[in-house]
Amino acid sequence: MISTTVSPTERRGRLLRVLGVGFGLAVIIGNTIGAGIFRTPGSIAELLPSFWLFLSVWVVGGLYALIGAFSIAELGTMLPRSGGQYVFARYALGEYAGFIVGWSDWISSCGSTAAVSLVVGEFAAALFPSLAGKTVLVAATVAIVFAVLQWRGIVWGSGVQNATSLLKALAFMALIIAAFWLGGRGAATVPESVAIPVGWSLFAAFIYGLQSVIYTYDGWTGVVYFSEEVEHPGRDIPRALFGGVLAVITIYLLVNLAQLYVLPVSQIAGKDFAAGVAAGVIFGRHGDTIFRTLTIVSMLSAVNALHLMATRVLFAMSRDGLFARKAASVNVGGTPTAALLMSALVALLFIVFGQTFGQVITVLAFFFVANYTLSFISVFVLRKREPEKERPYRAWGYPWTTGLALFASVAFLVGAIASDRRNSVYALILLAASYPVFRLIKLLSSRP
């Protein structure tokens, strides 16, 4: 819901409190559901070649997001400032912790914008031969167009988000219905030729699969990037968080059930785009076109959401003196224009030098769950340090649910380090190098 009761005088030079639950749902769905749901089922089916094991890892990943949402909802209503998890870490744990969260979140959001835009370019080139060899140009155009749409203000940006996310949800539901209506029954049982891992091998396979699932669920915190722009944060942030997470869990489970209804697990295993294979079975020669069109529709809402979120992170850091003060400037439409411009330029650099920066994106993925970890720690810190502070929403099941989410996050990080030591070492080096960068930025931002 968008409010239009704010006068031009009130709007000038600051963020506008005009967003509601509808936008919160749209930004969570738009940011979370992307290429991951198309790419990860193939790798997970390869690790867990069983109907029930395959589905269980998606359920566990969804429960992790849902339990985490209880704690993020408390922080978002207690500290209703735009900027995402950076706001929580800085307030509870200090400027350096906030800098780590904010900087990694901003860079990874810009990199994700580029990655998603490149998928649009690749798939558009497959649909339209005239665009062959112009993937980078198409990707750059997509990123620029959505940045221009947001330049006019949050009303435009949120309107685009609402429309593209609704279109995405409808497209997914159409695919799911078509799969159950037109598809044949898949293999709920495992073919005898496929060996199911047991013991330690099963545990390791489940952890590896869970890593991919958690990355695919990443983005469910979307609404807290806009906390001070939500009209009724104490009421609407929890509603958007819980509604958004449940919607994503439902869509992911239905998409995977639909794929398993059409194809046996053995035919999903190892496929880069298992949904594309399923679409070919359902729609025949039109399957590839339908699948690529659906993917492009999904990516467009993600590009818009990522632009919006990256802009708010940089704006919040700049407002707090952890980046150039100019990036905290806001136009009459409620858009932090300098932050939007910088975010779009970094995304374009990722697009142009995509292959060079691919390793960087992989390394930054390590910080996704690290940021969740710091947020869950922040709940414990603030409950002890400021027990009397107003909390419009208090985490359900605290301290057990927050503790469980924290334990799962730490276990995930340990698993990531054990399974991908090279990229984990790069991430730790990047973490160590962040402190001198933090001191330098503090020094430069303090100058008049």
Image: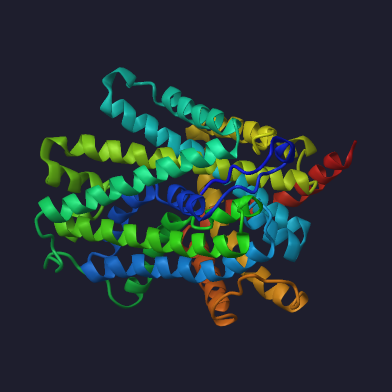
Of the pair 342 and 134, the residue shown nearer to us: 342
Q: Is residue 11 visible?
A: yes
Q: Quadrant of residue 205?
A: bottom left
Furthest residue to the right?
Answer: 448
Q: Is residue 111 visible?
A: no
Q: Quadrant of residue 156?
A: top right
Of the pair 28 and 343, the residue shown nearer to us: 28
Residue at image position (28%, 36%) is: 293
Residue 133 image point, x, y percent: 36, 21
Q: Is residue 421 left or right of residue 211?
A: right
- Vertically, is 336 above or below 429? above
Residue at image position (67%, 58%) is: 80
Q: Is residue 248 left or right of residue 276?
A: right
- Vertically, is 228 above or below 378? above
Residue 382 image point, x, y percent: 72, 72
Residue 117 image point, x, y percent: 44, 34
Of the pair 354 and 93, the residue shown nearer to us: 93
Q: How many marks?
A: 0
